[in-house]
Image: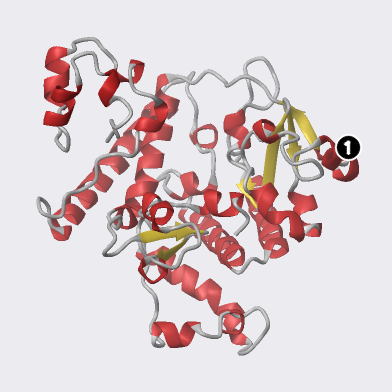
Amino acid sequence: VYNLTEFVDRHPGGPTTVLKHAGKDVTKMFLDIHKGVKYEQYLRPEAYIGDLGIDPDLMTDEFWHTLRKARIVEVKQQIAKLLEDMKANPGGAGIAAAASSVLDLLHDQGVDAELKAKLQSLETQKRVALDAEDYPKAQAIKAKLDSLLAESKINLAQLQGSGGGIPLSEVARHNKPHDLWVALNGVVYDLTDFLQYHPEQRNSILAWGGRDASVMWNKIPGRFPSSTWMEFYMRPEARMGEVGPEPKKDTNTALLEELRAELRRLEGPSDEDVQAMKAAGAAPKAAEGGAGSEEARFPKLKGITGGRELPFFTRAEVAKHTAGAEPYMILHNRVYDLKPLLGSHPGGDDILLARAGTDATKEFELFEH
């Protein structure tokens, strides 16, 4: 979906044709008339405003979920077949090389069921600790995960540039408070320990976790990232290495990554995940009224929810709630209904509705809310 407001006056065929077809899908007509022409050559990047969603008038929720479940089965079959082909190929990658995260291992049928159960338990405990903002605990659980993988002789694939160094695609995997890397002026730094001891700087650093923050260099003197900040805070041991070029991927590896990403978007939490998260989250609640319990941190929550358990949403379900009648937003893996905030948000309603249906965590942290 594109906003053509700026392009109307620049359209070679005049504004009349554009205005005549505004609000419609003109893909077929465009391809018929402009064969071989890429519209990116004419439209500015900011004209792209999002992908086409589901029209509730054309498809019911029930039918949409039927299609989603059918696609999940299809993707799982494609992943299984692809892994078999990669293992059968002597020059291909095996399970250990093909899996780049614990989530990949949990979806892999070739991994031992007992090991999967242990990994699932630790991964869930880590996510619960992150939700409770207990980052030292999350870091300790991550160490247990690494130890378990080492005992099982499984090495998760770590990308390395073809010319040496650390590619940005590897940096992007380390974007959580308990495991945080940042690229800056051609160098990769591990700021995990720094974040634990300087929580007051959490927002500005976490906003660039797993990314290249060079574009913000010295924009705010004394703040991260700036030369004065580096001189005062940065320790030599935080330096991981130089940023390297992206590694070349074979066709199977690239396809496997695409399928796994699609599966994560479609699946959301399984029933087993939900039960495991509830069980892992029961530990903080054991000490009723404790400082770390959800009831203690959010005393009004019980009154707001009426004592009922809140539901789990998939990202695909949240993506459907973009209208002003029921706008949803994801912040730190939690789903919020923005309707009560409309009309009172200091930045206006437009900025909220523009991000409705999406995960706005990075933007939220970037503006230090």
Residue drawn at 27 percent across, 47 percent down: 72
Judge left or right: residue 117 versus residue 84.
right
Task: Name the spot of residue 69 as percent of width and height, x first.
Answer: 23, 52
Tell me where residue 173 appears, x and y as whole percent.
58, 40
Q: Nearer the viewer, residue 66 or 222?
A: 222
Amino acid type shown at disc 1: Pro
| Residue 106, image x, y percentages | 46, 50
Q: Position of residue 265 (x, y in %)?
A: 36, 47
**Whether residue 198 is visible:** yes
Residue at image point 29% right, 58% down:
321
Q: Residue at label 1?
A: 236
- Secondary structure beneath disc 1? helix
Residue found 64% across the figure and 87% down from its top: 287
Q: Nearer the viewer, residue 361 or 210?
A: 361
Q: Quadrant of residue 238?
A: top right
Q: Nearer the viewer, residue 336 or 197?
A: 336
- Asked whether residue 146 appears in the rendered view, the answer is no
In the picture shown, does residue 117 fall above or below 18? below
